[in-house]
Amino acid sequence: MKVVVYAGSTLFLLAACNSESSRNARERHVLVVAAPGDGYSLGGDAELGLYPVNANIYEPLVRLSADYHPEPLLATRWELLPPNTWRFHLRREVRFHDRTLFNAEAVRWTMERMARRRPGATGIVAGSTRVVDDSTVDITPAFSNRRLPEQLVHPVYGIMAPGSDPAQRPIGTGPFRFDEYRAGDHITVRRFDDYWGERARLAGIVFRFVPDPATRVLSLRANNVDVVAEFPREVRDPRVVRSAVSGYEVL
């Protein structure tokens, strides 16, 4: 079972901040994680459940392998149709957390939403994404882009259920479903038992927002936390990381 957290484009693991809540969570098979800070927006095109903390609610079409190559996730394969269209063949029988089926329209709807927010380096703009059939979608960037599959590994391109509102209730296809959000305090996710892939071993994850890096490290050194990364630069002892992950299979 994989628990993946993003900060920018870097994978990392984090520490829990409160010893009592962490111990209680361990007894319930819930991992408590301390995130650097709450960067979510609930206004306009809300991004709850996406960047900066990917709580495994959403999944992109493509993920990054251990050796930093794009590999299939919600897309099983892709191909370049010259001169500048990428065709993605989608995984079948995948369900969103509301039990609706994932399909090409969900990809089109999500990409149109992303185009309003940040077309950026991908070149995905309004009208770039076209449904071929239920399990096939074409994406044509506004400019020549041979790196599109690599760029789509970023969690901001996680696929959303069409018509869903992340400001109210994020709905994705990931191994965990949204449970609760309190601005500036925490976001909680629970295991999604109908997940298409390997079922999560954890019952849930609590991401607590702890902006101060020293507080995260001190909590880890006191053995009051589960796992930590994104250490301050002065922390370099690998034993600290190994001691934090004992008892959990999270990677």
Image (tube, rainbow, N blue to C red):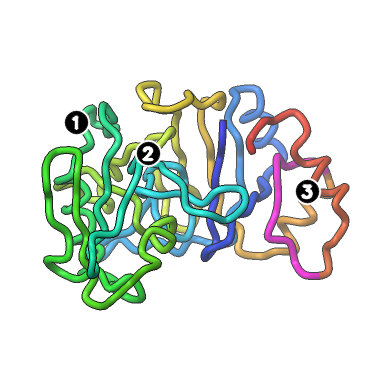
Q: Secondary structure at mark 2?
A: strand
Residue under label 3: 220
Q: CA distance from mark 2 to mark 3?
A: 26 Å
Q: CA distance from mark 2 to mark 1?
A: 16 Å
Which segment did they paint magenta?
Answer: 223-233
Q: Nearer the viewer, mark 1 or mark 3?
A: 1
Q: Quadrant of residue 10?
A: bottom right
User: Which of the pair 46/127 is nearer the observer?
Assistant: 127
Decide whether the magenta segment is chiefly helix, strand or loop.
loop
The residue tagged 1 is 100
Q: Position of residue 46 (x, y in %)?
A: 28, 60
**Horizontal side of residue 228 vs 203, given as left or right:** right
> What separation in Å lies between label 1 and label 3 (alpha carbons)?
40 Å
Q: Quadrant of residue 126?
A: bottom left
Picture layout, residue 30 above or below residue 168: above
Name the N-terminal-most of marks 2 and 1: 1
Amino acid at circle 3: Leu
Query: Going by the image, does 3 lie left or right of 62?
Result: right
Estimate how packed mark 2 is, as few (under 14), some (14 to 19) or many (20 or more) residues with alpha carbons within 10 Å: many
Disc 1 and disc 3 in contact, CB within 8 angstroms: no
The residue that label 2 is drawn on is 178
Q: Position of residue 51 (x, y in %)?
A: 43, 59
